Amino acid sequence: MIEFMTCGESHGKQLSAILEGMPSGIRMDPDLINHDLWRRQQGFGRGGRQKIESDKIEITGGIYRGRTTGAPIGLSIHNKDAKIDELPQLWRPRPGHADLAGVLKYNVGIREILERASARETAMRVAVGSIAKLFLLDFGIKVAAHVVQIGKARIKAEVSFDAILKRSDDSQVNCVSPDVEKAMIREIKKAMKDENTVGGKFEVCVRGVPIGLGSHVHYKRKLDGRIAQGLMSLQTVKAVEFGIGVLAAEVFGSEAHDEIYFDPKRSYYHTTNRAGGITGGMSNGSEIRVRAIMKPISTLGKPLRSVNMKTKAPEKADFERSDICAVPAGSVVGESIVAFEIADAFLEKFGGDSVAEIKRNYKGYLRSIEV
Ligand code: EPS
């Protein structure tokens, strides 16, 4: 089992994490981590904060001469906008934000709640996910995400894994189609003009996952449940779907499942992937395809009705600098979240203390399921 803990406020000194349980021998690549951090900061419709920050990882433990040692990995990202003590207290909770429930539950002000509820925290989740991606690459497993919808602009057809890999870092919305990208940018511009915000949907795909990660035997071990929990914990995510997802409610069984075939050269296989790569809580050998739906960000330039928590008078919600659209950034975070969950399930199945040991276990398993 791998686990990590993050701490740090949006405008505090730094974000920190300790990642525990990674084996020794993973080649560390700070450039790749920094590239993912950079990707998270991009996207048309991002707010002013990203012009201030240029997130860079500092690795403070668990690495020797460029490889993991098996010890807990210490990570920090310094905030440039680290002025938390100068920032004012707020009194008008934003509808849709953690503000109201957080203030009542913790008996503190809105400032204390928003500082930790902020999506700034996801920078660290990206760093952790990048390390998971580096581990998975040693086993030929690749994770990639792309934006499929912003507002009413959407990609209609399924996008191949290779097309997702080929998408350009220059895309302003992490979208594979230049035409749909234009329509997505139009949606964001509309929201911008109205001082509004807009949500959307991203898809995370994983290639090279062997059959049998996760398990049917216990609810906490189900791979789809674990991935869904990870994605639902991302700020603004309201729904998660695998494969045909919500469409499963309206089609008949004959259109909902993946028929099974056998070929002596390639073993068992499916010609469709309606399950999104997971059946019975276990990976089934097909690509994992999961989509997350993000609501529009709750900090609005034209705020919604709220209540002043000091006076109890009806007032408009507070507004602080925010994003118009965070879906492209969310897709990068989603990629990291899924990478972490796959790495966790992979280590659970093939666990060992070094990459070399895990490789032996993995090869033995692959041989055992050969027919
Ligand atoms: C974010 C940092 C935040 C926000 C945004 C995401 O920085 P600041 O509050 O200084 O502008 O831009 O967070 C929210 C929208 C939110 O509601 O907290 C980031 O780094 O992703």
Image: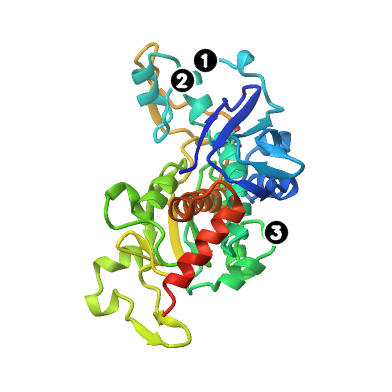
- x and y percentages locating residue 245 in the rendered image: 34, 64
State the mark number for residue 89.
1
Q: Secondary structure at mark 3?
A: loop
In this view, the residue in front, 267 or 74, is 267
| Relative horizontal placement of residue 284, taking residue 218 as reference (left or right) | right
**Ligand 1 is located in which of the four quadrants?**
top right
Tags 1 and 2 touching, CB below 8 Å: yes
Extreme residue toward the bottom, this view? 264
Ligand 1 is within 8 Å of the C-beta of the residue at disc 3: no
Query: Residue 95 falls in which quadrant of the image?
Result: top left
Q: Earlier in the sequence, mark 2 or mark 3?
A: 2
Which residue is disc 3 drawn over?
169
Disc 2 to disc 3, C-alpha distance: 36 Å
| Relative horizontal placement of residue 245, taking residue 133 as reference (left or right) | left
Q: Residue at x 62, y 48 (%)?
A: 130
Disc 1 to disc 2, C-alpha distance: 7 Å
Tags 2 and 3 touching, CB below 8 Å: no
| Relative horizontal placement of residue 219, taking residue 128 as reference (left or right) | left
Which residue is disc 2 drawn over?
110
- x and y percentages locating residue 116 in the rendered image: 51, 27
Vertical relation: 132 (above or below) 140: above
Type of the residue with mark 2: Ile
Split into 4 quadrants, where in the image is the C terminus? bottom left
Q: Residues within 10 Å of mark 2 (few under 14, many from 20)?
A: many
- x and y percentages locating residue 261 in the rendered image: 36, 85
- x and y percentages locating residue 211 in the rendered image: 42, 67
Q: Nearer the viewer, mark 3 or mark 1?
A: 3
The answer, for residue 72, to whether it is visible in the render is yes
Q: Residues within 10 Å of mark 1 (few under 14, many from 20)?
A: few
Vertical relation: 365 (above or below) 109: below
